[in-house]
Image (tube, rainbow, N blue to C red):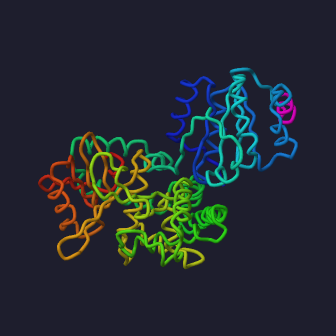
Amino acid sequence: MEERIFKRKFYEKMLAWKRDNDGRTALMIKGARRVGKSTIAEEFAKNEYESYILVDFTKVGPEIPALFDDVSNLDRIFMALQFYFNVTLTPRKSVIILDEIQECPKARQAIKELVKDHRYDYIETGSLISVRRKTQGIRIPSEETRLTMYSMDYEEFRWAMGDETTVPLLAQAFVDRHPLGDAAHRKIMRDLRLYMLVGGMPQAVNTYLDTQNLSLVDATKREILGLYDEDFYKIDPTGKAASLFKAIPAQLAGNAHRYQITPVIGEVEDTALLTLLHEMEESKTVNVAHHVDNPNVGLPMTDKWDTFKMYVGDTGLFVTLAFADKEVTENIIYQKLLSDKLAANLGYVYENMIAQMLTASGNKLFYHTFPDKNKHFYEIDFILSRAQKICPIEVKSSGYKTHKSLDLFCEKYSDRIRNRYLMYTKDLSKDGALQMVPVYMAPFL
């Protein structure tokens, strides 16, 4: 199979780090496994420096990690690295990549002295779960610029498909509030469903481009989920984290107003549960929407840590997880999903995708529930803070003509509403003050 280097927006953030910091900090690329951290680090080094050394701590011999046990003589370390990798480093024109740095905690601790020396630039990468677990007991350097990398967003996916036109046109249509028309809308919805099925993990995208076979894509995604499973057991050897992750599709399909923890893992002491959930959220394998009691500007001030909804970080992985009862998800199921003909309510898949899109656009996720006089609960799927107001979002894959939750919410909190959005599978439209927005425009909210 061809190994492609995909165009990623994260590259621009790396350029900004190099330009603005001039070696005063190391760049720590955080993120889940297989989102492309190592690939983009090496591509950046090739393009932006005269030379580089890539130290992959999962592949080097024991003599390389041992170099960082004593950083009192940096000349010794740099000379040893140049001989080992047969690369000449040039001061202020070379970079050292410390890949899978969680395997060598002393190397991360050494960043303080390495940056202070200022001879070279440094880029660190690693699976965040493992980084957190394996750096306990060492001094985490403050001389790090920490950036999070996610799987490919919808625009990056379209770039991979050879399409650099669609998303800018969609952004302009959103600003102009201009409907696309039936033909264009149907095409874009089919393209979006392909993104939902393949997802944004570079390996899965590469498999699709090579084979056009969605069952083979599914096999690639299952390999990635297997790696996630290993990481979750590093968080919690009892398997609670892995169980919480695997239950996400069932929890969303059940249409509950919160993640029901006890049926999945039983009773857990609050402190242990808080630690577990925090580490899962920090792993970036999941996106978590926190419930807010008082939906207003400053949403985090009233969120409840133990009332939340959890989404898979990549919707392509979510689809595979949803069909995990089969050893292989048949191509026919993918084709029916792609053509929107599978006899199932796929609203929760769209909800997961919108959570992913909003997160990729830099938003933290919040939601709100409220009862009526009969104790029936209404739910607002997502709430965004914009200027001094809030924007409630309701997600609908069908039945879009009824949106009682959104109507009642906007009536109850009328003084704080900026825009109200119904995200659905139809073309851009408007119903009074309600903006009815196709799901593929979620990144522009």
Q: Which residues are magenta?
A: 79-86
Question: Could you say where residue 83 lies in the image, as x and y percent from the top left?
Answer: 87, 31
Q: Residue furthest left?
A: 432
Query: Closer to the camera, 71 or 225?
Result: 71
- What residue is rendered at 72% in x and 23% in y? 117
In the displayed structure, 21 sits above or below 202; it is: above
Judged left or right of residue 150, residue 178 is: left
Judged left or right of residue 228, residue 413 is: left
Query: Closer to the camera, 27 or 180?
Result: 27
Query: Closer to the camera, 401 or 7?
Result: 401
Question: Could you say where residue 394 lies in the image, as x and y percent from the top left?
Answer: 27, 60
Query: Residue 97, located in which quarter of the rendered image?
Result: top right
Q: How many marks?
A: 0
- What residue is rendered at 62% in x and 55% in y? 129
In the displayed structure, 157 sits above or below 407; it is: above
- What residue is rendered at 67% in x and 26% in y? 49
Question: Could you say where residue 126 lies in the image, as x and y percent from the top left?
Answer: 65, 47
Overall secondary structure of the magenta stretch?
A: helix
Q: Quadrant of the N terminus?
A: bottom right
Query: Closer to the camera, 430 or 310?
Result: 310
Question: Could you say where residue 190 lies in the image, as x and y percent from the top left?
Answer: 38, 60
User: Magenta stretch containing residue 174, yes or no?
Assistant: no
